[in-house]
Image (cartoon, rainbow, N blue to C red):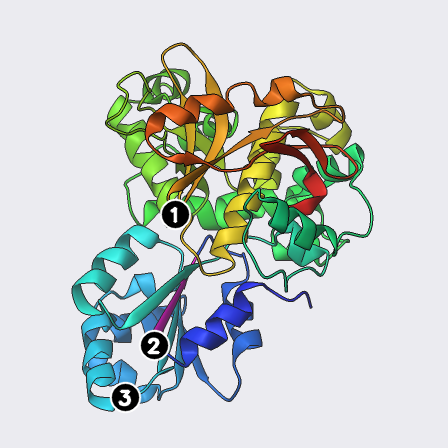
């Protein structure tokens, strides 16, 4: 069983908050994570069970009498009526670690949580396995930041560089625990079942879908745009649905933790920066399945090779924050002259520029846009080009080429 980075944070939260909520897509291991993180006996109930769900909805007080604390409630989004009843118990008991909750529909969860449990709940996000977790580096102390100190600390745990083929095998396979931990699991069968069982069903719980074929075409269309600027009109046209339908369906994918909309960095200093977000599919295996790449080799050699590598690198950086229980301030930069920086990390009073490149021989030209951040009114921190170098290589005094295997 692979150790999850978030386990350490959960044990800390258990001692300081009465309620913990773990959110994330279906099948990323939320329940297993909580089982591994529990120091003692905890009662457990899942609201995937229809009878339990109906009781939780119709009589939340009786439901909570039937399941004593400390209690783990799985898929709690199915019964938002529970939140007010949980608040009563929390305020009465005045103990930490009373309730651990999981949920895979963040929008509905946040609405209920903010109304009833504000100040009483700690919220963390979980995705599929990170590269560090798969390689046994889950104890890595810090989330990604392209400073010389982070590079040196991380490099001490790296045994050998990542080959191009190995990275694309991981991209193509994805990060869902059942695939990572079971080499005999047929990838395509897993993803076919995942799309039919979870995505279609969960979306129906939120919006009315009358055309499953159109929705599946929508999923494939969105997957084909990973790493690109979001354009609802283009998606709606290609799927032959209304603009508002495309927006509603994408919102569901976002709140389900399947896609991430990276916002552009902007300030009042300049008006020449675009306001359109960038779209990333957070699991590259699911994305490659939906876009019908039959093998890792065909994906690496194909037209979307660069977009998938960028998506993989971005999702690994996002995981490094979420799996440490941190909220990252991640952006990209793009102005009206089409000048772009793939990722901008805001930390304190500094902006750290990052480029994603499919190369083993980066040059300082890869950092040529980093100076654009100087006009945004903040200090510019050490930058990075993440690529296929075998070891860190200084490109300029202010930027380093970092191996993809360090993520």
Where is residue 101 shown, x and y percent of the image? 38, 70
What percent of the width, then of the height, locates residue 344? Answer: 46, 34
Q: Residue at x 32, y 79 (%)?
A: 18
For this rendering, which residue is in front, 315 or 344? 344
Q: Is-magenta flag for residue 21? A: yes
Closer to viewer: mark 3 or mark 2: 2
Q: Which residue is mark 2?
A: 17
Q: Residues within 10 Å of mark 2 (few under 14, many from 20)?
A: some
Residue 289, relative to residue 73: is it above or below? above
CA–CA distance in space, label 1 to label 3: 45 Å
Mark sitting earlier along the chain (1/2): 2
Mark nearest the camera among 1 and 3 is 1
Q: Residue at x 34, y 53 (%)?
A: 106
Q: Which mark is residue 348?
A: 1
What's the mark number on residue 37?
none
Identify the residue at the far top of this view: 337
The disc at residue 65 is 3
Q: Secondary structure at mark 1?
A: loop
Residue 365 visible in the picture: yes
Q: Residue at x 20, y 83 (%)?
A: 91
Query: Within the image, what quadrant is residue 103 found in?
Result: bottom left
The range drawn in magenta is: 17-23
Q: Earlier in the sequence, mark 1 or mark 3?
A: 3
Mark 2 lies on a secondary structure that is: loop
Figure label count: 3
Q: Position of residue 196 (x, y in %)?
A: 50, 45
| Badge 3: residue crowd in 10 Å (few <14, some 14–19, many ≥20) | few
312 left or right, relative to 26:
right
Magenta stretch holds residue 293? no
Magenta stretch mostly in which secondary structure?
strand
């Amino acid at each position: 069983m692979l150790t999850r980075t978030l386990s350490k944070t959960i044990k800390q939260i258990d001692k300081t908050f009465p309620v913990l909520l773990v959110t994330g897509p279906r099948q990323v291991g939320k329940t297993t994570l909580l089982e591994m993180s529990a120091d003692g006996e905890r009662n457990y109930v899942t609201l995937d069970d229809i009878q339990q769900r109906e009781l939780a909805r119709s009589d939340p007080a009786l439901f909570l009498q039937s399941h004593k604390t400390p209690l783990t409630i799985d898929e709690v989004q199915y019964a938002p009526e529970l939140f007010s009843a949980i608040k009563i118990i929390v305020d009465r008991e005045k103990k930490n670690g009373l309730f651990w909750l999981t949920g895979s529909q963040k929008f509905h969860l946040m609405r209920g949580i903010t109304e009833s449990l504000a100040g009483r709940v700690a919220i963390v996000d979980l995705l599929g396995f990170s590269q560090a977790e798969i390689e046994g580096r889950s104890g890595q102390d810090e989330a990604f930041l392209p400073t010389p100190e982070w590079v040196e600390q991380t490099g001490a745990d790296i045994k050998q560089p990542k080959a191009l083929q190995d990275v694309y095998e991981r991209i193509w396979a994805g990060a869902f625990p059942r695939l990572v931990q079971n080499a005999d699991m047929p990838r395509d069968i897993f993803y076919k079942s995942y799309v039919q069982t979870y995505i279609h069903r969960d979306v129906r719980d939120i919006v009315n879908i009358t055309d499953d074929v159109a929705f599946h075409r929508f999923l494939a269309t969105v997957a084909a745009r990973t790493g690109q600027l979001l354009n609802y009109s283009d998606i709606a046209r290609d799927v032959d649905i209304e603009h508002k339908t495309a927006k509603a369906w994408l919102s569901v994918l976002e709140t389900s933790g399947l896609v991430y909309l990276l916002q552009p960095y902007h300030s009042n200093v300049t008006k020449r920066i675009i306001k359109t977000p960038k779209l990333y599919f957070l699991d590259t295996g699911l994305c490659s399945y939906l876009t019908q790449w039959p093998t890792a080799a065909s994906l690496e050699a194909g037209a979307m090779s660069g977009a998938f590598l960028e998506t993989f690198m971005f999702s690994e950086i996002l995981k490094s924050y979420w799996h440490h229980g941190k909220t990252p301030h991640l952006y990209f930069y793009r102005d009206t002259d089409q000048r772009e920086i793939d990722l901008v990390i805001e930390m304190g009073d500094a902006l750290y520029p990052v480029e994603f490149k499919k190369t083993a021989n980066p040059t300082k030209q890869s950092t040529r846009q980093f100076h654009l951040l100087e006009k945004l009114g903040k200090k510019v921190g050490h930058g990075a080009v993440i690529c296929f170098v075998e070891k860190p290589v200084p490109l300029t005094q202010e930027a380093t080429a970092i191996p993809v295997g360090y993520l």
